[in-house]
Amino acid sequence: MRLRTLFVALTAALLSAATLASPARAQIEVDVNRGDIQPLPVAVPAFTGERGAEIAQVITSNLERSGLFRPIDPAAFIERDLDIRYQPRFAEWKTINAQGLVNGEVTVDATGRLTVNFRLWDVFSEQQLLGMQFTSTSENWRRVAHKISDAVYERLTGEKGYFDTRVVFVAESGGRVDRVKRLAIMDQDGANPSYLTDGSYIVMTPRFSSTSQEITYMALRPDGSSIYLFNLETGRREALGNFSGMVFAPRFSHDGSKVAFSVERGGNTDVHVMDLRSRSTSRLTSDPSIDTSPSFSPDGARITFNSDRGGSPQIYVMNADGSGAMRVSRGGGRYMTPVWSPTGEFIAFTKQAGGQFHIGVMRPDGSGERLLTTSYLDEGPTWAPNGRVLMFSRETPGGPSRLWSVDVTGRVVRPAPYPQSGSDPAWSPLLN
Amino acid sequence: MTTSTMTKRAAKFAIIALAAASLTACASRPKPEAVGPTPPPPPPPASQPGTPPPPVSQGALPGTQQDFVINVGDRVYFDFDSYSVRGDAAQILEAQAAWLNRYPAVMIRIEGNADERGTREYNLALGARRANAVRDFLVARGVSSSRINTVSYGKERPIDPGTSEDAYQRNRNAHTAITSGAN
């Protein structure tokens, strides 16, 4: 069964990424960095029925963008009258070397209810791998397409997908000296962008809760800064706390019960945490240095943060009560914005060295550092909920900031599907 | 009709006319002011005709925002990832302190800024350090801390859009903005 090749290759890649930490097995690193995963050729012909072509197109784009699949140009298809009720003519799909085939059918009933049936086939073993049905309102067809994409991705890679998600970010406009920054949100594929603030003040560093459709972000005005909670479902927005100095860098704990952030007083910046239920705040660091960009481990037991207590900005890990802070970044250069992966396996970061910026990952103990990108200015990684892809901001010299993404092996680096200027992306959890 | 009758009538008419005229005068004309002696004519121009007039120098009124910006300096600069007050900055800050002590009603906001070669969050903290370094300098020279607010714009408000070292240098600054109390 040829699809096994993909499972094996992916598993090998993930294992080797995971084992990079161990110097004794460093030879496996070569495999990953050579990028020897060949994207799997798949065919996604237009589904039959209303919106069928668009749904197939959304699935095709999702799979292609992941870098793990190579959709075949529909012009090459031989079988043109696929019917979900019958087996495909496998020989004709083998001829064009499609290893996976996704076909489907859309129906809309009198009440506007949309039903999509689809099947995923392993062409070379001539077996059905998935047969599923999704129903929703007809205007929700894009989400159905994302759910199908996730099902196909999960069946073929063995990992959860990340296509039925959204990204909150800062939409930028205006010149470099008078930039307008508005909070914005879009589907992960760039569809349905909309603004959440009006641009009359600066917003930055929005972050998604990993348990709800809630975000936290920072607003900066001439009279100071504040951090907010914003429920995307209810539209309710509230300021968190009332601090005399600057307050910034908010981020949820993975269970959504706390927000960690920085408070600056008299030039000294420390990490604080607020329990969202009781609204009680405690201060976690007290070093006379910059302590910022806190990020919880998925189990909530530890916090990684950025500190220059050793003379230059580096990455530290401490217990969630502020005890036991230890530096984990080891290489030369300046390390910033540590972000714990949803699986707990890695800390992603921004690194500044030799006049360049990088997005990289390391194990939480600082071992196994790998730089995934290099550019004039890369900054602020955010993890897709499956821990497989990172989105970040990239600026070219003098140019606008854009959203980019990179997979955790560093093989697939590409612009995110948002054609305008944006920064500070933050990935949502999978939608319900 | 005799001549005398004619004269009397004419005189009577003249008196009425006069009365009317004086009434009109009283209603519309202000009382004339005493006028002094006519001034002597100005001396003839000493220079050749066509020569431009002498220059008019202008300057900011003391105690105004313009006075502060032009004659004192409202911005000081920092080294990369540093918030120590350099020698060139100390000179300007001495002058800022002296000016602020002269105009005690003036309230200020010190805005810390960073160049783009750093992350957003770290640079917010760095800008705050710079704003506070300036604040501490001014307070040490007698400016009341109650007159000073600080804010950090991090790397969000560059004054130079360039990407050269010179541009980065200009963008690593603390700006003293007058918020109220200037003349």
Image (cartoon, grey):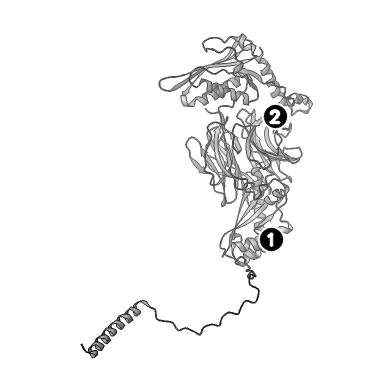
Q: Position of residue A401 (x, y in %)?
A: 63, 39
Disc 1 target residue: B92
Q: Do the residues labelled 2 and 1 touch (CB within 8 Å)?
A: no
Q: Is mark 1 on a helix, strand or loop?
A: helix
Label 2 element class = loop
- Image location (x, y in percent) of residue A163: 58, 26
**Marks 2 and 1, how far apart in space?**
48 Å
Q: Which amino acid does label 1 sit on?
A: Ile
User: Label 2 sits on what residue type?
Assistant: Gly
Chain at numbered mark 1: B
Q: Which of the 4 image quarters holds residue B105? A: bottom right
Residue behind mark 2: A410
- Categorize mark 1 by other alpha carbons within 10 Å: few (<14), some (14-19), many (20+): some
Q: Is residue B96 visible?
A: no
Residue sitting at x 64%, y 62%: B70
Q: In this view, does A76 lie above or below A58?
A: above
Residue B151 in percent (x, y) is at 61, 52
State left or right for residue A123 relative to residue A108: right
Residue A334 at least partly seen:
yes
Q: Which mark is drawn over residue B8?
A: none
Q: Quadrant of residue A327?
A: top right
